[in-house]
Image (cartoon, helix red, strand yellow):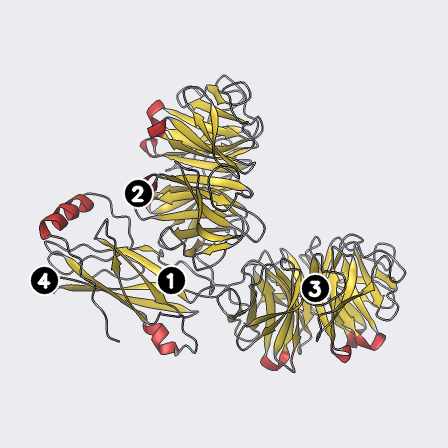
Amino acid sequence: MEFITVVQHISIRTLLKLTILLLSLPLYGCGGGGENKRTEGEGPTIEISFPPPNANLAGNTDRITIRGRSVADGAEVNEVLLNNPDFAAANVKNPPANLGEAAVGQFDQTDPTRWSAQIALVRKINRIKIDASDDRGRSTRVTHMVRNEPTFANPQGFVVDANNNRALVVDTGSDALIAADLTTGEILVLSDNNRGSGPPFSFPTGMDYDALNDRAWVIDNGLDALLAVDLDTGNRRVISNESRGTGPEFDVPFEVVLDTDRDRALVTDQGLKAIVAVDLNSGNRTVISDDNNGTGPSLAGLRFIALDRPNNRVLVTDVTADALVAVNLTTGNRTVISDSNTGTDNPFSFPIGVALDTNQNRALVVDDNLDALLAVDLITGNRTTISAATRGTGPEFLAPVDVSLAATNNRALVTDADMRALLEVNLTTGDRTVISIQAETGTGPVFADAFGIELDIANRRVLVADDLLDTLVTVDLDTGNRRTLSGANTGGGINFVSPVAIVLDSANNRALVADRRLPALLAVDLATGNRTVISNATTGSGPVFDLPFSLLLDKTNNRVLVGDTGIDALIAVDLSTGNRMEISGTNTGVGPELVFPTGLVLDAAHNRVVVANNNDTLLTVDLSTGNRSVISNANRGTGPEFNLIFGMDLDTANNRALVADFKENVNALLAVDLGTGDRTVISGEKIGESRGAGPDMGFPLGVVVDTVNQRAFVADRDFNAVFAIDLGSGDRVIVSQ
């Protein structure tokens, strides 16, 4: 491929000044998984700042922005070229528009040592060749590995496609329809926001497969719709929703099963408390069974459904009644097959997925609370444990969701949301085996509730507070590897109970941690992991903490400012004495009230603190008076409105705050202009606005900005992962999971 050269017009003298200045700073970029072969007097340096090495795009995109920095000794870097031989070799049928295996780096006009380029990817490993050359004819090449390996995020309903030896799975975490090969375990995205046309998935929970037409029928809980998905192209088409078809509109539809004999689909709807039949040609909806149609117990907690065609009925699980219920498809009458009063042994606790095992005249049911697969005799209702912690070997269930019979070998398949996996269960022994290949990112302890996050750039890592593991974990930014820095078994001193926020006190080689349930401010020695109380009810004087939730370090005044969500106040803590003083709250300062202050940043230039107020408002607090003012909300500033704002950090280079904003299925990192209050989507999705490629965030909580490299790191509690976000393009990658 022919490359077009981009030359930067800047004098050698100016470049040398910039080079001397920049080389005096620590190097924040990374070699990107490739070896930088440059030595003194040879070609330019190549340092990659985004994406970090070993990060994964989870197969959610066909492109990525690569950002880096190149410097030459006594010369001008005039060209950076990128090439992806893996994309070229893949012979992609439908390559992304205007992108291919090659790209030319575009230099930053404000800092000509920095460059970026967008390049096409395959959904596997991409080994990007990056060449930089200078005006003296010298060049350097590195290889930067970009992983784009599909992975389950939150697998839900699925079916077995026996003809193609695969399971078809809907995933609410990645909003995708995914195929898992039952022999190799390889995962392939069939349809998502980056593959296929039509309405993008919003929260797909259930599906069935039409083998004759090679298409999937998907229930999308967020769209309140039944979709048809072409498995060859990934294209999505609405079959039934509020705009297509007559009859009662869906209200929290959950699962679907095809009734091909009658050319219809049968849908469980939690909001309607009904079984709804959908005509596959017209999209018309008809209630088969609800409180007004048919007799028997109310379907208050409908989940999954299985068709028992020979008996003209469906079997449904009900998590409110903890029951397996049969529904007659002619009359709509409902009959309990198994519950605490029907059948013996192992009462249900939260039955979800169900599959019919006709040969054994039984149903297979997964129970989320029991973490078990049960067999239910369809005549007696008796329940037998097939597989659980106490029966069978292999990894224990964590959050089993759905079940399906495999075509052969007396086995069942089960999706597990917390394991992010598809498991095979031997129906005789109960033994469990993970069969889907999960593209893990990093090794070490797995996050249980990734909450607060802080950047330790000197050690090329982030620190993460895990609210459930009660630990402080380090994440290596080059490998994604996780290590417990401090916890019950690492370091001495008082144990964490619920650590939620962290700030780095580099001068004292320690991290300061807010524990909301102790409640206390702790210091953690970064060398030993030892924990020391800085301030709590018995250490220091002043107002007692209730639920300390957010922190910032005010180094100039040797204090930490704490946002307490229990007393809705901003508290200053003297780091020498532990004494506490209310800076702003009910008794200090005037202006709009503090309500659940979940994020804090220090705007030292204006002697104020910016507060993420959990009532969808960003406030400023004057540090001299404690007075509060609105800086951004629905009535001040333009752009998408806040939903539920949590973590926040300051992007000093651009005079803005970066805020994690959460709403189910609509999650984003927002930039807020500190002068005007205007809000802009940096990365993710808000209603009417979407920005950046890569895996979607689930529940972004902690945010920390790497200003030098113009990237942010986000702790996501839904995916229990650390994301890196390029602030220029909004592209997202998983750094550790």
Residue 136: assigned label: 4
Query: Helix or strand or loop: what does disc 3 sit on?
Result: strand
Q: Nearer the viewer, mark 2 or mark 4?
A: 4
Q: Give the x, y percent position of residue 545.
A: 54, 25
Q: Give the x, y percent position of residue 122.
A: 41, 70
Compared with 378, 482 (above or below) is above
Compared with 464, 571 (above or below) is above
The amino acid type found where label 1 is placed reads Ile
Visible in this render: residue 462? yes
Q: Are marks 1 and 2 in contact (CB under 8 Å)?
A: no
The amino acid type found where label 4 is placed reads Arg
Q: CA distance from mark 3 to mark 4?
A: 64 Å
Q: Are marks 2 and 4 in contact (CB under 8 Å)?
A: no
Q: CA distance from mark 4 to mark 1?
A: 30 Å
Kindly identify which residue carries mark 3: 255
Q: Nearer the viewer, mark 3 or mark 2?
A: 3
Query: Dot 4, crowdedness within 10 Å: few (<14), some or many (≥20)?
Result: some
Q: CA distance from mark 2 to mark 4?
A: 33 Å
Q: Give the x, y percent position of residue 156.
A: 63, 62
In the rendered structure, which disc, 3 or 2, sits on the residue that comes first in sequence?
3
Identify the residue at horizontal 46%, vertical 19% (top origin): 579
The amino acid type found where label 3 is placed reads Glu
Kindly identify which residue carries mark 1: 64
Q: Give the x, y percent position of residue 277.
A: 77, 68
Kindly identify which residue carries mark 2: 458
Report which quarter residue 306 is drawn in.
bottom right
The amino acid type found where label 2 is placed reads Ala
In the rendered structure, which disc, 3 or 4, sits on the residue that comes first in sequence?
4
Identify the residue at horizontal 45%, vertical 60% (top origin): 694
